[in-house]
């Protein structure tokens, strides 16, 4: 390599972007749309707030072979084909890890470098993974007993109290001091897993489901004994457990799950990130009610607490994470009327105020944004009882006729439990839009350019 070329390379920059969000929060769609917007940045006028585009300094973007050859490639091609197909469809829930590397070429505006080597490259690495696995992170700080206690407390409240009944009844029949039998471990963990799956059903829509691999094992761990344990409801203090006991075996498997599954995942994929976006789908929980909302709020805060952005934080201690910018984003903002976007942002800000405070205290700069990676609705107006009202029009996920509706006002503060009355909100899911010229003009979105500017803008 010639000196000039070497010198140019040394001036190129790299960003690792952590896309963080619970399952179904919109990670895969966000990554797909982000890649799509960047690939179409030159032809497109959809990114007015992304300065590198609006100042005409972008010279093009390409997907490159990723640096980690052992990790599957993010299937952008497949996802975009689905999103832009006829009929367009959403990507499937993610069941494993994948990675994409982008090279963004741009014209430098650094006066010193402008003459020597004006064209620079910013490399952006992004990892996609199932949202379920994110909830494993808090386990790293918890002993088996502490984790069991947390789950036991959650199971005292509805709807978990009812949903966990079968598992709890079986668990209570077990003698924890008896010798561990594979068949018992299998049965009790299966009942616990069934309980977690029930919590996930749309009418309950609970988020705080641990361990993450129980409901999303991934190809590597399907049926592995490592997933055959469960938390305990009561741990009697004054009994001697021997090493072969059921209790000792469950505890051993929990510790090995942390060591071989959780730590490995975070070490390989959550280390050395510089930027983070936290995606939260708050609207879905508005529909399902207070319990579902509280569960999602607690799950996100619990995950963010584990990140502890300061030097002594868990992620930092274990994996050397150095995040300097963090974006909190309320996803699927196309489910609300445009006048409600600021409410959605305020709501998310209030919901995650402590986490945001903790991050900024440690010097991480942060912002809150309502966005839609793929805008599926159009804003419209209708007249109701003589009054002009905003509404949205789109193709509902179930059905093949477009509808117009007013989905409800987004509150700024969390409503009191008794105010979550049924039917107050109708935040409906929509099909992706049918687009004639998507490969020429990019996917429609809401504020993705703001997100790009905040996350990457200062690197150019
Ligand atoms: N209207 C609208 N719906 C969206 C948008 N992004 C995601 N969705 C909906 O949310 C669902 C989940 O999105 P994904 O991107 O697959 O979510 P994820 O976070 O990758 O989920 P996991 O892979 O299960 O962790 C999609 O199937 C869509 O129904 C958006 O920008 N607008
Ligand atoms: Mg996904």
Image (tube, rainbow, N blue to C red):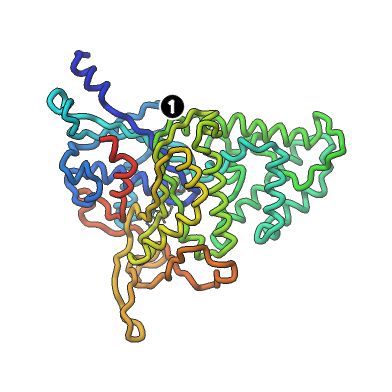
Residue 242 position, x and y percent, is: 83, 30
Q: Return the residue at label 1.
A: 70
Location of residue 114 (image quadrant): top left
368 lies above or below 247:
below
Location of residue 396 (image quadrant): bottom left
On the rendered structure, is 166 left or right of 344? right
Q: Residue furthest top?
A: 2
Quarter of the image with the C terminus in it: top left
Residue 348 position, x and y percent, is: 45, 56
Residue under the point 37% across and 26% down:
67
Residue under the point 58% across and 35% down:
221
Residue 397 position, x and y percent, is: 40, 63
369 lies above or below 316:
below
Viewer-proximal residue, 432 or 156? 156
Residue 233 position, x and y percent, is: 75, 48
Quarter of the image with the N terminus in it: top left
């Amino acid at each position: 390599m010639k000196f000039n070329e070497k010198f140019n390379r040394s001036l190129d920059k790299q960003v690792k972007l952590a896309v963080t969000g619970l399952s179904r929060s919109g990670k895969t769609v966000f990554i797909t749309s982000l890649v799509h917007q960047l690939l179409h940045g030159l032809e497109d006028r959809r990114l007015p707030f992304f300065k590198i585009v609006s100042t005409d300094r972008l010279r093009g973007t390409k997907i490159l072979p990723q640096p980690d050859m052992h990790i599957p490639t993010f299937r952008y091609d497949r996802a975009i084909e689905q999103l832009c197909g006829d009929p367009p469809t959403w990507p499937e829930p993610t069941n494993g890890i994948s990675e994409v590397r982008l090279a963004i070429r741009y014209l430098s505006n650094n006066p010193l470098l402008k003459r020597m080597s004006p064209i620079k490259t910013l490399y952006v690495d992004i990892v996609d993974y199932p949202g379920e696995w994110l909830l494993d992170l808090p386990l790293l700080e918890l002993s088996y007993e502490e984790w069991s206690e947390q789950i036991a407390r959650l199971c005292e409240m509805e709807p978990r109290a009812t949903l966990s009944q079968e598992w709890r009844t079986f668990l209570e029949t077990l003698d924890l001091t008896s010798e561990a039998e594979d068949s018992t471990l299998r049965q009790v963990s299966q009942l616990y897993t069934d309980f977690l799956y029930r919590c996930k059903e749309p009418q309950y829509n609970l988020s705080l489901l641990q361990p993450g691999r129980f409901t999303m094992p991934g190809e590597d761990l399907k049926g592995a004994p490592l997933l055959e344990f469960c938390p305990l409801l009561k741990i009697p203090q004054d009994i001697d457990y021997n090493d072969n006991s059921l209790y000792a075996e469950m505890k051993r498997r929990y510790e090995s799950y942390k060591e071989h599954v959780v730590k490995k995942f975070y070490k390989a994929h959550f280390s050395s990130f510089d930027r983070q976006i936290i995606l939260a789908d708050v609207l879905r929980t508005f529909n399902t009610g207070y319990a579902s909302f509280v569960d999602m709020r607690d799950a996100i805060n619990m995950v963010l607490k584990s990140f502890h952005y300061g030097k002594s934080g868990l992620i930092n201690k274990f994996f050397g994470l150095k995040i300097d910018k963090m974006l909190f984003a309320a996803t699927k903002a196309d489910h609300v009327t445009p006048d409600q976007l600021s409410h959605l942002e305020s709501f998310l800000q209030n919901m995650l105020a402590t986490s945001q405070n903790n991050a900024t205290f440690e010097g991480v700069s942060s912002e809150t944004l309502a966005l839609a990676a793929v805008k599926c609705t159009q804003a419209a107006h209708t007249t109701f009882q003589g009054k002009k009202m905003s509404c949205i029009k789109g193709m509902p996920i179930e059905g093949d006729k477009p509808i117009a509706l007013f989905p409800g006002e987004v509150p700024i503060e969390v409503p009191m439990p008794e105010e979550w009355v049924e039917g107050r909100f109708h935040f409906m899911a929509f099909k992706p839009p049918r687009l004639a010229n998507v490969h020429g003009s990019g996917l429609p979105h809401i504020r993705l350019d703001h997100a790009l500017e905040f996350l990457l803008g200062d690197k150019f």
